[in-house]
Amino acid sequence: MHPNALLDLTTQLVREVLKLDAPADSIVSYFFRTHRELGQRERHALAETSYAVLRQRLLWANLAQSGHGPMERRLVLLAWQGEPHVLKKGMTADEAAWLERASAIDRSALPDKLRHNLPDWLSNSLRDQLGADDFWALVDTFSAGAPLDLRVNALKNKREAVIEALAAANIQAEPTPYSPLGIRIQGKPALQKLPLYTGGEVEVQDEGSQLLSLLTGAKRGEMVVDFCAGAGGKTLALGAMMRNTGRLYAFDVSGHRLENLKPRLARSGLSNVYATQIAHENDDRIKRLRGKIDRVLVDAPCSGLGTLRRNPDLKWRQSPKAIEELQVKQKAILNSAARLLKPGGRLVYATCSVMPAENEVVANAFTEEHKDFVLLNAAEQLDKMGVSQAESLVTPAGHLRLWPHRHATDGFYAVAWEKKA
């Protein structure tokens, strides 16, 4: 495709993404379905440029003020992530001169807001939690994108053998530092056609998400519930931990998300999973299981603000009001899930958020209100599951707290309780 046409298409995509009326990944996917003429490299350039604009939206918008032409095109020129010759051939002489001037600006001298590219309410919360040095380290990590993590399906293979098979396919991989099942790959190789993937020996899953599953301590023959299963990444991990025995219920209000679990289940070899769409957290199908369940994982609906490496649009699409509304829902779901536990059963509450309002506030309120549940130390439980350096992952209060800049995972939070016998 001619560079001019490619820049025009990228401008169209950025214009759609910046409306912020839907998740960026769904907008990008739909755009590619309607432009099937684009090759793999061209798709990569369009997608990565769009995400680069979202990551540093305030900076690019400020620099773009000095240029001419459509704002979205100026943003594309500033954030271009494709091959350099495309940019060089697609620009006019005036655009090239302007871009050179804009690129020469010392960004370290710009106001903080243009350096961190976060809304004030979010940057203030993160600074309060982390302090100045850690805050800027997190900002750098959010701007860098994320590696690709895999979870080995222990029913079908071992981590060392998978790493060797990936090396034979010219994919460099290494064990993740914490999860005993994790593998980390730099870059974005095409995995979908590899026998390892099609045969269900590996699943794409962030190491932090793997740790949440391990925190449940699910065992052979138990009754386990994944209360907010979604597309089932943690469901698959739990089923493998249970060695395909017992009963594993995957509940979710979205039938579409549960449909996406079906092909993954087929690859995994699991036959102990019962995927069920529910209307709400007090659905009759849940009430029938009260007092019967050994382990419940509540991966609660949340702001997703721990996943900004992958989903930079969320920082512009979320708000303090939205988080207040989510907190109400989180507490209701957690209270309902707690009723499922039998005496001695374990409850795990988790989010992929970095906001205390969705994490510690919810967990501490539950601990205070439910005297029949005892808080567990997450480090001790993870250590039992073979997690390395578990102490470094846990707060003084015993809660699991993962940060992208410290642990190279998405930002996750989790806490575990045991119901008194």
Image: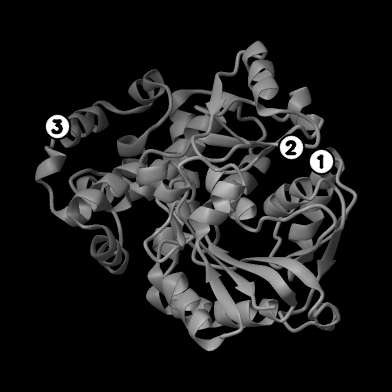
Q: Nearer the viewer, residue 414 or 12?
A: 414
What crowding class fits label 1: few (fewer than 14 Cα within 10 Å), some (14-19), or many (20 or more)? many
The first of marks 2 and 3 along the sequence is: 3
- In the orientation shown, which residue stands out farthest toward the left? 109
Query: Residue 99 falls in which quadrant of the image?
Result: top left
Residue 394 in percent (x, y) is at 43, 56
In the image, what residue occupies the spot 50% across and 27% down?
186
Closer mark to the observer between disc 2 and disc 3: 2
- In the orientation shown, which residue stands out farthest toward the front? 421
The first of marks 2 and 1 along the sequence is: 2
The first of marks 3 and 1 along the sequence is: 3
Residue 102 in percent (x, y) is at 18, 37
Kind of residue sitting beneath label 3: Ala
Kind of residue sitting beneath label 2: Asn
Kind of residue sitting beneath label 1: Ser
Give the residue pinned by disc 1.
268
Closer mark to the observer between disc 2 and disc 1: 2
Q: CA distance from mark 2 to mark 3?
A: 49 Å
Give the residue pinned by disc 3.
104
Q: Quick check: can you spot residue 87?
A: yes
Taking 29 as reference, is 112 above or below it? below
Give the residue pinned by disc 2.
153
What crowding class fits label 2: few (fewer than 14 Cα within 10 Å), some (14-19), or many (20 or more)? many
Q: Secondary structure at mark 3?
A: loop
Q: CA distance from mark 3 to mark 1?
A: 51 Å
